[in-house]
Image (tube, rainbow, N blue to C red):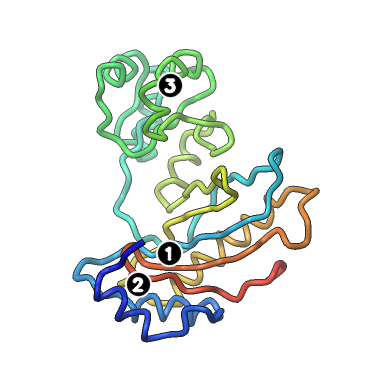
Amino acid sequence: MKHGKKYRESLKKYDSMQEYDLVKACELVKELKFTKFDETVEVHVNLKLSKSQTVRDTVVLPNQFRGEKKVLVFCKDDRAQEALAAGAAFAGADEYIEKVKGGWLDFDIAVATPDMMKDVGRLGMVLGRKGLMPNPKTGTVTNDIAAAINELKKGRVEFRADKTGVIHLPVGKVSMDAPKIAENIEAFLSEMMRKKPSDAKMDFVQSVSVCSTMGPGVWVAYKVGE
């Protein structure tokens, strides 16, 4: 892959083969930024997983870095007011199912009560493609509407290993203080290790790196149990 001049220049500012402690790695990501916009900081974790293993869960990051998300709650009409009072942007049943069928997607996250999933499941072709389908594994299918909305607004995010065993997760902005970015990464790594498959091997975590949207990656010195 060919990179531009600014990217190549940034590579000269540090040892790209060295592993750094987490805070130092986040500081380097900030120093290596060369664009004018406020880039997103991402963490990438390469895991050793067998074909039958997966790692997937959610975590509430302690330091917010994104704007408030618009939450749509699929629920019976008698619970719509409860959802709106808890902070949902939209809430209801048939009205919103029909709107989504028609291509309306003016929301960031969808939550559904269990009794709505039979109908919401029919929206799979629309919501699934956009990664918006409510799922019990991510806490977006629940009867506790208020708790779900509260966590989502606090910054709850989903992480999941892809087919190659790599987790990619946005964890901050370059404009944030490095310790705050590191704190978000630590919260994620701690939750990721809690979801480690019981039969995973000692070398479960192959590598951890951080980078900004356009910048080069920085290796993180991470050991299982830290």
- Residue extending furthest toward the right: 199
Q: Residue at x 62, y 55 (%)?
A: 192
Position of 147 relative to 118 (above/below): below
> Nearest the camera: 168 or 73?
168
Q: Residues within 10 Å of mark 1 (few under 14, many from 20)?
A: some
Q: Position of residue 55 (x, y in %)?
A: 63, 46
Kind of residue at badge 1: Asn
Q: Position of residue 120 (x, y in %)?
A: 44, 19
Disc 2 element = loop
Q: Which residue is mark 1?
A: 63
Q: Residue at x 29, y 65 (%)?
A: 39
Residue 124: mark: 3
Q: Which residue is mark 2?
A: 176
Query: On the rendered structure, is 81 left or right of 168?
Result: left
Question: What's the CA distance linking mark 2 and mark 1?
Answer: 9 Å
Kind of residue at badge 3: Gly
Say whether marks 2 and 1 touch (CB < 8 Å).
yes
